[in-house]
Image (cartoon, rainbow, N blue to C red):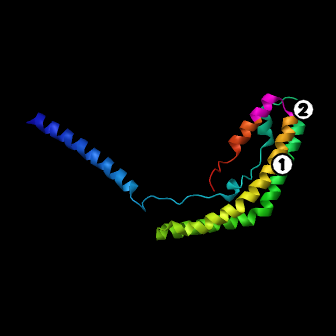
Amino acid sequence: MKKVFQKTNRSNTLLLILFSMVGQSLLAQMPGRSMSPPEFNAIEKARIITYDTEKVIKKLKITEDSISKEVSMHLATYNSEMDNLLLLHSQTLRDLENEFDRNVKIAMQKRDRSQMNGVKNKIKEIIPPIRYEVSKHEKVLNEAFKNILTEKQFKKWLKYQKQHNPSSTNL
C-alpha cells in the first residue's frame, strides 16, 4: 500500500508541476498581460552618438603620439558636431519621444494600433534628415581616419564604429 501511495504521490506532483508550467505559459501569452510598451529613444534612432577618445585610441592600439593627437583632434571635432546637432534638435526629439509614449499608452488602452500611424509618419519625417546630417559628419571622420590610420587600425575603427552605432534598422 505504501508503494502505491508513493507512486501516486509522485505522479500527482509531476502532474501538478506540469499543469502549473502550462498555466503560467498560457497566462503569459494572454493579450494585455505583462505587455510593456515599446521604448523609443529618438537620439539613438537619429544615431547621434559621441565617442570616448581614450577608449578609441586604446581600442585601435595607437602608440604614436602624433597619430594619437590627430585622432583626438578629429574625434573632438566630430563630438562637437554631434553636440551641436543634439542642441539643435533636442526639443524636436524630446517632443517626438513624448508623443510616441503618449500614443503608445492610448493604443494599449484602446487596443488599437492605428493610433500609432500618425507618430510613425512623424518619425519617418523627422529622423532621416537628422541621420543624413550625422552620416555626413561620419563620412568626414572616416575619411580623416582612413588617411591617418593603418589599414588594420582603420578596419578596427569601422568595426568599433559599427558596434557603437545603435541598431536602427526600423523607424
**Which portion, as a residue range, is magenta?**
148-156
- Mark 1 vs mark 2: in front: 1
In space, the residues marked 1 and 2 are separated at their CA atoms by 20 Å
Task: Look at mark 1 in the image and give the residue it sits on.
Answer: 78
Q: Residue at x 76, y 58 (%)?
A: 130
Q: Residue at x 68, y 55 (%)?
A: 45
Q: Earlier in the sequence, mark 1 or mark 2?
A: 2
Residue 24 visible in image: yes
- Residue 7 found in image quarter: top left
Tell which residue pokes out farthest to the right in this image.
66
The spot of residue 17 in percent (x, y) is 28, 45
Q: Residue at x 80, y 61 (%)?
A: 87
Q: Is residue 167 left or right of residue 59?
A: left
Q: Is residue 58 above or below residue 34?
A: above
Q: Is residue 89 magenta?
A: no
Q: Is residue 155 magenta?
A: yes
The spot of residue 102 in percent (x, y) is 58, 69
- Specify the label residue 13 is tagged with: none
